[in-house]
C-alpha cells in the first residue's frame, strides 16, 4: 500500500510540475505575443499637397491593433527650430478602440503666425509609440517625415488680352499671366467655370481660356478670373468686357401618336424607360429626363480636352444644306392641340440630301463615338483647349475614338437616329460645359477678330 501511495504521489507531483510548466510556457508565449510584440503603429495623414497655406488643419490617424497606442508627438522643423504641434500620452482605455484597431484620431492645427513660422520650406515630423514592452518598455516606434512648403501668398492674375466682347449664347477668349503655377485657374461666367490652359505660349505662366455665355445669360452676368495655387490660396481678377443681349426664335413642334409609335421603339433599352405609360408620357420622359442625362454626359467631355490648338480658321458647315432649326430656338411641343412640353434647341439642324456625307468642321481628335439617346448616333471632335464640335442623328460613322481628322474629312453620313423627325445633321459647338452659337465659329471674320488676332498680338508681345 505504501508503494502504491508513493507511486500516486509521484504521478501527482509530475502532473503539477507539467501543469506549471505549461502555464509558464503559455505565459511566456502570451508575453511574447502581446507585451513583447514587434509591430510598430501605423500613421496615416490626410494631406493632399506638399504646399500648405498659413492656416490649415491636417487630420491624422494612428493605429495599433496589437498593443494599442501609447504616445504621439508631432512637430515642424524650420531653420533649425522645432515647433511642437501635438504631444499626448494615452491611457489604455483611450488607446484601445472598441473595433479592435487601437486607433486614435487627432488634428494638427498649423497657424504660422501663431507658431512663429515663416514662408518657405519646413519638415513635418510625426512619431508614435505603442504599449509593447519592447525597447525597454518604451514600445515600438513609428516615425514619419514629410517635406512641406508654407505658402500664404495668393496668386496674382494679370489680364493680357484687351477686348472681351461676347454675345448672349456666344464665345470669348481671355489670355492672362499667373504669378506662380496654379492647380486650378480659369474664368467664372456666372455659375459656370471655364478651365484655363498653358502650353500655347513659351511662358508657362501665360494661359488662355475659351469661355462662353449660355443662351440664358444676359448682360448682367458677372465675369471674373480665378486661380488657386498648390497651397489652396486663391486669387481673383476682373476683366473689361461687354455683353451683347440677344433674342432667340420660338417655334411650335406638333407631335402625333403615329410619330411617337414610329420613334419610341429606339429608346426601349434606355434605363428606367416607362414602357407601361401612355405614348405621350413616354415622350415626356425622353424630352425631359433623358435629355438632361444626355446633355450632362456631353458637357462633361471637356475635362478630357487636349492641351493643344488643333483647329485653324473658320469652321465649315454641311455643304449645300438648308437650315431647319437654329441655335437656342425656344421649342413648344404641341400634342392634340395643347402645349405639353418645352425645350431649348442647343445646336443648328442642317438638311441636305438623304444620307449626305458629313465633313469635320475643323481639325481635331475624335473624342466620342456613341449612341447618345435623343442625339442618336453621335461623333464629338475635340479641337483643343476645351473647344468641341458635335455631329448627331448620323446614319453611318466612319471614325473611331482617338482618330485625328482634318477639316473636311468625312466622319459619317446624315440620318434620323435618336429624336429626329427626318434625315438631317444636328450640329453643335461646345465651349467648356456650355453649348454655344455655331454661327460665330462658321464666321472667319469673327474668329480673326475674337480669337486669332488676340493670340497673334500676345504672341508678338511676349513671344510664342
Image (tube, grey):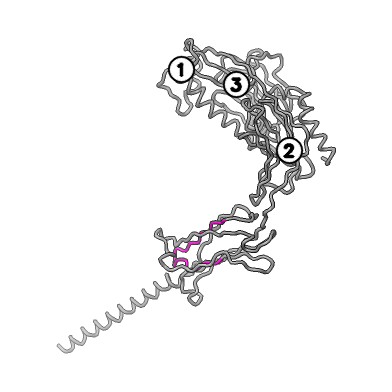
**Distance from Cα at disc 3 to Cα at disc 2:** 29 Å
> Which picture quadrant has residue 237?
top right
Q: Secondary structure at mark 3?
A: strand
Question: Mark 2 — residue?
Answer: 208
Label 1 neighbour load within 10 Å: few <14, some 14-19, many 20+: some
> Which picture quadrant has residue 112?
bottom right
Question: Mark 1 — residue?
Answer: 280
- The outermost residue toward the top is 337
**Distance from Cα at disc 3 to Cα at disc 1:** 20 Å
> Which picture quadrant has residue 423?
top right
Q: Is residue 231 magenta?
A: no
Relative to residue 82, is residue 245 depicted above or below? above
Relative to residue 281, is residue 462 depicted above or below? below
- The outermost residue toward the bottom is 2
Q: Position of residue 37 (x, y in %)?
A: 46, 70
> Which circle, 1 or 2, is nearer the viewer?
2
Question: Mark 3 — residue?
Answer: 345
Residue in the image at 54% along x and 56% along y: 59
* Quadrant location of the C terminus in the rendered image: top right
Magenta segment range? 57-73
Residue in the image at 74% along x and 30% along y: 311
**Distance from Cα at disc 1 to Cα at disc 2:** 46 Å
Give me the disc on residue 321. Answer: none
Q: Is residue 62 magenta?
A: yes
* Quadrant location of the N terminus in the rendered image: bottom left
Amino acid at each position: 500500500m505504501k508503494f502504491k501511495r508513493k507511486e500516486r504521489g509521484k504521478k501527482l507531483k509530475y502532473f503539477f510540475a507539467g501543469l506549471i510548466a505549461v502555464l509558464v510556457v503559455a505565459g511566456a508565449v502570451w508575453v511574447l505575443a502581446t507585451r513583447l510584440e514587434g509591430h510598430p503603429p501605423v500613421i496615416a495623414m490626410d494631406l493632399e499637397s506638399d504646399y500648405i497655406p498659413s492656416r490649415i488643419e491636417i487630420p491624422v490617424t494612428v493605429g495599433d491593433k496589437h498593443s494599442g497606442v501609447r504616445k504621439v508627438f508631432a512637430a515642424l522643423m524650420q531653420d533649425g527650430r522645432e515647433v511642437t504641434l501635438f504631444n499626448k500620452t494615452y491611457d489604455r482605455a483611450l488607446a484601445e478602440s472598441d473595433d479592435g484597431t487601437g486607433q486614435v484620431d487627432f488634428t494638427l492645427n498649423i497657424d504660422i503666425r501663431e507658431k512663429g513660422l515663416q514662408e518657405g520650406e519646413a519638415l513635418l515630423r510625426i512619431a508614435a509609440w505603442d504599449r509593447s514592452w519592447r525597447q525597454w518598455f518604451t514600445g515600438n516606434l513609428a516615425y514619419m517625415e514629410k517635406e512641406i512648403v508654407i505658402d500664404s501668398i495668393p496668386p496674382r492674375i494679370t489680364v493680357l488680352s484687351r477686348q472681351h466682347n461676347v454675345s448672349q449664347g456666344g464665345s470669348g477668349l481671355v489670355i492672362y499671366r499667373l504669378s506662380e503655377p496654379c492647380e486650378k485657374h480659369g474664368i467664372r461666367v456666372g455659375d459656370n467655370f471655364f478651365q484655363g490652359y498653358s502650353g500655347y505660349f513659351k511662358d508657362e505662366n501665360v494661359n488662355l481660356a475659351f469661355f462662353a455665355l449660355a443662351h440664358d445669360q444676359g448682360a448682367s452676368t458677372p465675369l471674373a478670373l480665378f486661380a488657386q495655387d498648390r497651397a489652396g490660396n486663391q486669387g481673383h481678377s476682373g476683366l473689361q468686357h461687354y455683353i451683347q443681349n440677344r433674342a432667340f426664335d420660338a417655334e411650335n413642334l406638333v407631335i402625333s401618336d403615329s410619330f411617337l409609335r414610329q420613334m419610341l421603339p429606339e429608346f426601349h433599352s434606355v434605363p428606367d424607360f416607362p414602357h407601361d405609360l401612355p405614348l405621350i408620357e413616354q415622350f415626356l420622359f425622353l424630352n425631359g429626363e433623358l435629355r438632361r442625362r444626355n446633355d450632362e454626359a456631353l458637357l462633361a467631355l471637356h475635362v478630357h480636352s487636349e492641351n493643344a490648338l488643333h483647329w485653324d480658321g473658320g469652321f465649315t458647315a454641311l455643304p449645300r444644306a438648308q437650315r431647319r432649326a437654329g441655335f437656342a430656338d425656344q421649342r413648344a411641343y404641341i400634342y392634340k392641340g395643347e402645349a405639353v412640353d418645352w425645350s431649348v434647341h442647343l445646336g443648328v439642324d442642317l438638311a441636305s440630301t438623304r444620307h449626305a456625307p458629313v465633313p469635320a468642321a475643323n481639325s481635331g481628335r475624335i473624342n466620342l463615338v456613341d449612341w447618345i439617346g435623343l442625339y442618336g448616333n453621335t461623333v464629338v471632335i475635340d479641337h483643343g483647349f476645351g473647344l468641341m464640335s458635335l455631329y448627331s442623328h448620323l446614319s453611318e460613322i466612319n471614325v473611331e475614338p482617338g482618330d485625328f481628322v482634318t477639316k473636311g474629312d468625312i466622319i459619317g453620313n446624315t440620318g434620323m437616329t435618336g429624336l429626329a423627325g427626318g434625315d438631317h445633321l444636328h450640329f453643335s459647338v461646345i465651349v467648356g460645359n456650355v453649348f454655344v452659337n455655331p454661327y460665330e465659329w462658321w464666321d472667319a471674320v469673327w474668329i480673326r477678330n475674337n480669337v486669332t488676332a488676340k493670340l497673334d498680338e500676345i504672341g508678338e508681345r511676349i513671344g510664342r
